[in-house]
């Protein structure tokens, strides 16, 4: 099983809508948002991509497609790694927790830091930051220094002053 | 094991929720576990993390590629060199740099030493959690030898930031190899000592065999890599599957056990230390003389001798330090088999001196996600052992 065969298979199934490229020795499979879950399911069942490695979301504020979501998958039987890239215009995308349970933690992290909302996630809460944190720090419009940690209500509750 | 069932309700007839942590001696860092208990049986566990979050990924977007290296140490502070290596491999993938032979060998030596050091801390603290004190003292004695070696070579014991993009910072002094040889000579025997204390110890067996079961399918489904996966019968190691650096030149085995419990993960790690020793032995024999930094002008830092003699090197060094270098546009990912599992760096570049987005795939973070399935149905007293067997470092989880 090589990467070319996977690309060919999906090109036959969804003609002209799936593109594959090898960039800096990494295999990228770009799929459309409308059927990306079918592709992921098929990758798991047909090509034995049972091991989910990571989910990465990137914010591109200047583009029409505001977010990239990349699924990093590994097939231990065929010894091949594939990155499935989905571009989304707004921050909403379907969850993949029903395909891989490990996506639970990964999606929560991306929701927390980048602010992508995974629809259908069983427990979409912040994971690394406190629940009352405002904003999503890995978005490009979130400044590095002029940050606001707590809101007024928390200041009163906790008896601290962090906002300007 | 799988067939352990949540017992019938106790006389209280209700599930109570208690907090374990935030500070617990069996975790390296701050971890709070919200545990639902039915009597003494665990019904559900919800890890609550983020107490150590330092925003490393955000910091990376505001630093040049060289400046980010010291921050990678602070992730998994028990094996900093593995993180250095993963990050540098990721940046080197942009350029396809040729690394000098000697640097490659030293990278392997240090990555393996970091693996042994990390596993030694693991065996020490894990045994201490379960109640064996002696191993703690023995394992730290050997770890001290490794830290001494780190100090000789890098000047630091814990956060060494020694591996650079394009090679390593500086060649090791000759004294280092004497120490390494001494360590290789005694270590096999010391491993036997630990195993004599634990492997057939009845208390140890009672506390570990059959506890914290996870099947191989589940381990993959949850993304749990490293010793958890190999303790559940899946023979997967990135050093063999996607050989990075020069791991394809060494002869070593991947330890793999079918049981999937704490005891299997213990055996995997003990065996791994012996295999690492084998790699060290071979690397010490094969290591050639030569430069340790690439002469590729795009990324390689000119050496101090060159800087003193050649104007171009001085300008180049000044430019690399103050401005950094530009990467081509695109996205890449590189990963290594760190002591805790797969550690990878996903870098998105928009052609500037700083990464546009840098995502760290931390092994402990994903492994912790698999903790609930391991803990369900066991006693609350076993939870400490199960947390220990996952081998978490909260610096890596929270980033």
Image (spheres, rainbow, N blue to C red):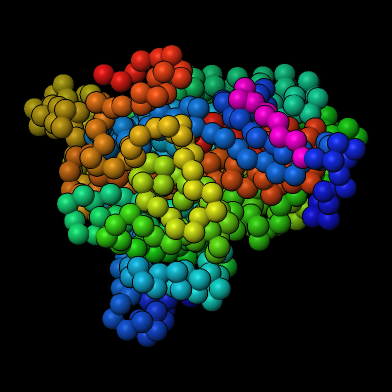
Q: Could you tell me which quadrant the C terminus of chain B lies in?
A: top left
Residue furthest to the left: B311
Residue in the picture at 19% in, 59% down:
A64
**Magenta segment: does it hold B21?**
yes
Residue in the picture at 40% in, 69% down:
A36
**Residue A116 x %, y %:** 37, 51
Image-based side of B179 in relation to B353, left or right = right
- Residue B4, compared with residue B118, is above or below; it is below
Identify the image quadrant of residue B72: top left
**Residue A143 x %, y %:** 24, 32
Q: How many marks?
A: 0
Residue in the picture at 56% in, 25% down:
B29
Residue in the picture at 72% in, 22% down:
B136
Image-based side of B195 in relation to B340, left or right = right
Is residue B161 at all visible to an observer of this figure? no
Image-based side of B33 in relation to B164, left or right = right
Is residue A57 at all visible to an observer of this figure? yes
**Residue A73 x %, y %:** 47, 61
**Residue A123 x %, y %:** 54, 49
Front-lying residue, A109 or B384 = A109
Image-based side of B382 in relation to B330, left or right = right
**Magenta segment: does it hold A30?**
no
Identify the image quadrant of residue B392: top right
Read off the magenta span.
B15-23
Front-lying residue, B357 or B7 = B7
Front-lying residue, B145 or A146 = A146
């Amino acid at each position: 099983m090589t990467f070319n065969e996977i690309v060919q298979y999906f090109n036959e199934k969804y003609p002209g809508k799936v593109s594959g490229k090898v960039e800096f020795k990494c295999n990228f499979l770009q799929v459309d948002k409308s059927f990306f879950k079918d592709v992921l399911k098929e990758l798991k069942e047909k090509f034995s991509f049972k091991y989910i490695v990571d989910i990465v979301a990137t914010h591109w504020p200047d583009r029409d497609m505001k977010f990239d979501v990349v699924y990093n998958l590994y097939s231990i039987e065929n010894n091949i790694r594939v990155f499935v890239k989905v571009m989304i215009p707004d921050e909403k995308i379907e969850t993949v927790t029903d395909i891989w349970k490990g996506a639970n933690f990964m999606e929560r992290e991306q929701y927390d830091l980048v602010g992508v909302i995974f629809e259908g996630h069983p427990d979409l809460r912040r994971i690394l930051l406190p629940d009352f944190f405002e904003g999503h720090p890995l978005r490009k419009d979130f400044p590095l220094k002029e940050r606001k940690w707590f809101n007024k209500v928390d200041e009163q509750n906790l008896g601290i002053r962090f906002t300007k | 094991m799988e067939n352990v069932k949540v017992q019938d309700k106790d006389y209280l007839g209700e599930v109570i929720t208690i907090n374990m942590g935030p500070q617990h001696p069996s975790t390296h860092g701050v971890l709070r576990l919200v545990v639902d208990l039915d009597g003494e049986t665990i019904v559900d566990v919800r890890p609550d993390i983020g107490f150590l979050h330092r925003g490393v990924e955000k910091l990376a977007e505001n630093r040049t590629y060289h400046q980010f290296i010291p921050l990678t140490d602070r992730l998994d502070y028990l094996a900093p060199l593995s993180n250095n290596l993963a990050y540098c491999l990721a940046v080197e993938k942009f350029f396809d740099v040729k690394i000098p032979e000697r640097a490659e060998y030293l990278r392997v030596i240090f990555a393996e030493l970091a693996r042994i050091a990390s596993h030694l801390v693991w065996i020490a603290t894990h045994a201490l959690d379960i109640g064996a004190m002696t191993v703690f003292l023995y394992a730290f004695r050997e770890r001290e030898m490794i830290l001494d070696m780190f100090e000789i070579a890098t000047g630091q014991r814990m956060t060494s930031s020694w591996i650079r993009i394009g090679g390593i910072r500086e060649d090791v002094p000759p004294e280092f190899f004497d120490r390494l040889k001494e360590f290789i000579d005694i270590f096999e025997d010391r491993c036997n000592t630990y195993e004599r204390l634990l492997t057939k110890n009845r208390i140890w067996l009672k506390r570990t065999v059959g506890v914290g079961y996870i099947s191989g399918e589940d381990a993959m489904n949850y993304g749990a890599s490293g010793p958890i996966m190999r303790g559940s019968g899946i023979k997967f190691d990135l050093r063999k599957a996607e050989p990075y650096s020069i791991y394809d030149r060494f002869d070593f085995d991947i330890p793999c056990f079918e049981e999937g419990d704490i005891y299997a993960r213990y055996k995997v790690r003990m065996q791994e230390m012996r295999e690492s020793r084998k790699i060290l032995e071979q690397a010490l024999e094969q290591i050639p003389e030569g430069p340790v930094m690439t002469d590729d002008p795009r990324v390689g830092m000119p050496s101090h001798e060159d800087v003193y003699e050649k104007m171009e090197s001085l300008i180049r060094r000044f430019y690399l330090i103050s401005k950094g270098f530009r990467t081509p546009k695109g996205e890449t990912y590189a990963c290594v088999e760190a002591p805790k599992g797969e550690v990878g760096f996903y870098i998105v570049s928009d052609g500037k001196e700083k990464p546009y987005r840098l995502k760290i795939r931390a092994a402990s973070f994903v492994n912790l996600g698999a903790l609930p399935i391991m803990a369900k149905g066991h006693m609350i007293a076993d939870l400490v052992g199960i947390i220990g067997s996952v081998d978490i470092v909260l610096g890596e989880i929270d980033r």
